[in-house]
Amino acid sequence: MPNDSVRNINVQLLSDNWYTLNKITFDYLNDKGVWETQHRESYDRGNGAAILLYNTSKKTVILTKQFRMPTYANGNDDGMMIEVCAGVLDGDAPEKCAIKEAEEESGYKITRIKKVMETYMSPGAVTEILHLFIAEYTDEMKVSEGGGLDNEHENIEVLEMPFSQAINMISNNKIMDAKTILLLQYAQINQLF
């Protein structure tokens, strides 16, 4: 349903290099009943999917570790981030994307997944909706070493660790990725282990 407090939307393309950066100018009816012109930049990278792989019998999770330049540029000492498997939908349904990314990044072929939520990760600047999933894995599901795709320049380290260790890594800032924190806390709240 359209928002009656927004009108005269004008979109100007600023960059179409990796993804799309737009400058959006619009009129907004503020809480005093006055129309004001606002300017925002909006980064469109498409929607994505992320998945937490967990093993109830071993009480472990599969996470990934990779270099993330934006975090490095913002003071993350080595730029390395520990995350759940994730990727951009690229036209796929969220479920299909999550299953594909799990196999590419972790090496585990997952068939049954459960959607737990959708979220905007940074709604002030990024258009992306992230679809979050969980799936149980077993050792028998391992079909490769994972690590991502060479043609996407992915250099991903696969980490299998106790769930309790992953939860502790949130407290000591070893895991700072929001989607990963959400999924680990979902697992904790819903007592998957």
Image (tube, rainbow, N blue to C red):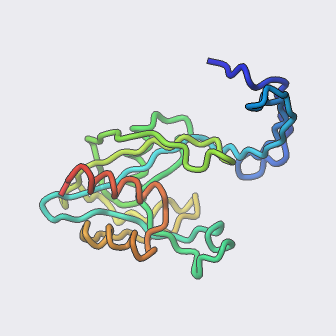
Q: Quadrant of the N terminus?
A: top right
Q: Does residue 163 appear left or right of residue 47 in this picture?
A: left
Residue 6 position, x and y percent, is 76, 26
Q: Does residue 79 appear left or right of residue 19 in this picture?
A: left
Q: Furthest-front residue in view? A: 32
Q: Quadrant of the C terminus?
A: bottom left
Residue 98 position, x and y percent, is 41, 45
Foreground residue, 167 or 65?
A: 167
Residue 181 position, x and y percent, is 41, 59
Q: Residue at x 60, y 50 (%)?
A: 122
141 above or below 33? below
Q: Residue at x 67, y 47 (%)?
A: 124
Foreground residue, 41 or 58?
A: 41
Foreground residue, 166 or 99?
A: 166
Q: Furthest-left residue in view? A: 57
Q: Does residue 134 appear left or right of residue 74 in this picture?
A: left
